[in-house]
Amino acid sequence: MRFVDLIEKKKKGYEHTKEEIQFIIDSLMNGRAEDYQVSAWLMAVYFNGMTIEETANLTQAIINSGEIIDLSPLRENCAHIADKHSTGGVGDKITLILIPLLAACGVPIAKLSGRGLGHTGGTIDKLEAIPGFKTDLDIEELIEKVKDVGLAIASQTKRLTPADGKLYALRDVTATVDSMPLIASSIVSKKIASGADYVVLDVKYGSGAFIKTPEKACELAQWMVDIAAKLGKKFHAAITSMEQPLGRAVGNAIEVIESIEFLKGTMTSDIKELTFEMAALTLVELNKAGSKEEAYQMIQNAVNSGRALDFFKKLILSQGGNVQVVDNYRLFPQPKYAERIFAESDGVISNIDAYKTAYACKLLGAGREKKSDSIDYSAGIYLNKIYGEKVSRGDVVATLYANDEGKLSLAKEFMKDAFVFSESEQPVRSLIYKVI
């Protein structure tokens, strides 16, 4: 078998066999295929696509390129191992809320998360805004913490799906990132290699997401659900709007604070809708609840009783963080400067552009351009007014936080344009477009 023959085959639109897919990944990993050959193959895939069968075989080969985490020791407490994944959004702190909620409902969670590239940090960056919080756990330590307290969140290990990292590096420089089978195999391989057999996906679309339309988001979601099924796993996907930021906080420490407030019972409707839906899908699938209605009641009870907040505290304590932050937000990193944006007229908030908000937050220092960049945990944006809320001229609609006055000035000018005002009352909107 020769790599050039497989490039030729895909160039002509033919389907690869399982053995050919494995040869491609083996050649990538052992260096027998040159980068330019793999790049040519990726371009052929981009233009001619792959079948579900091919993509499932690619996903399995990527999984097999590295370690596969064995979470079977956790099955004593739950028949299935659950996980969640988001394709990324603005103000997306759902993991910080969902994991303790599920743990409070009897679902042990061992989650591997990543750092962020872009407007804010990822889940790991946000958790590291908690003083002392340790995310660098080896797999054995991760499992022990879950067995001990019911949940743990650690940074991703490079030992999982190394072939995906190599493929992505080439996709990034060959303009082949936005290929449905390549995106789907990348996401699904990491989730399965992480040990989960049930995953609930949050596939976002809109100005603050890399997918712009609900139709394309549905297409990607269906790819991932179907690939997982081919590999004997169960996935659900919620297709959700990212036209506006989630909740009121965008940043790192500021999003952790909003998550704590949610677990204390102060919820914005959009975060509640999405978190409850994802939790309910998981609880029903894992037979922890007999129906979605029962699941919703369990979730609300977990918040009302304080159990969900208690599990968040357990997470912090277990991983070395200062649990006093739950009651004293001044213990989080504090910014030197704050700048307010005021409404210039009376009206109702009809839109807050997610991309413009994200870009303003990145200007403040809450995100990074490359992996080696540092993140300002204290930088961020608080939306004093969100969609559907009435404002009067002079009301504060947003507050920006930073440690650099120059950055603050730049971000303020950009953030002003994010708000759209209407004279009329706005309709109630659902964040969830569809569930697959």
Image (spheres, rainbow, N blue to C red):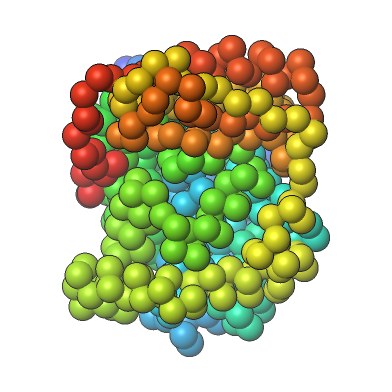
Q: Is residue 89 above or below residue 212?
A: below
Left or right relative to 313: residue 272: left
- Percent across and percent down for residue 29 are 64, 40
Residue with the most extreme bottom position? 76
Say which residue appears at 43% left-offset and 71% top-offset. Answer: 303
Image label count: 0
The part of the image, by quadrant, that contains residue 247 is: top left
- Percent across and percent down for residue 329 are 69, 55
Looking at the image, can residue 242 be seen? no
- Percent across and percent down for residue 97 are 49, 59
Q: Is residue 83 above or below residue 174?
A: below
- Percent across and percent down for residue 435 are 23, 49
Q: Is residue 388 above or below residue 172?
A: below
Q: Nearer the viewer, residue 432 or 7?
A: 432
Left or right relative to 404: residue 379: left
Say which residue appears at 39% left-offset and 16% top-offset. Answer: 345
Q: Is residue 128 above or below residue 264?
A: above
Looking at the image, can residue 378 be seen? yes
Say which residue appears at 23% left-offset and 38% top-offset. Answer: 429
Q: Nearer the viewer, residue 61 or 353?
A: 353
Q: Nearer the viewer, residue 262 or 149?
A: 262
Say which residue appears at 72% left-offset and 67% top-offset. Answer: 324
Left or right relative to 243: residue 396: right
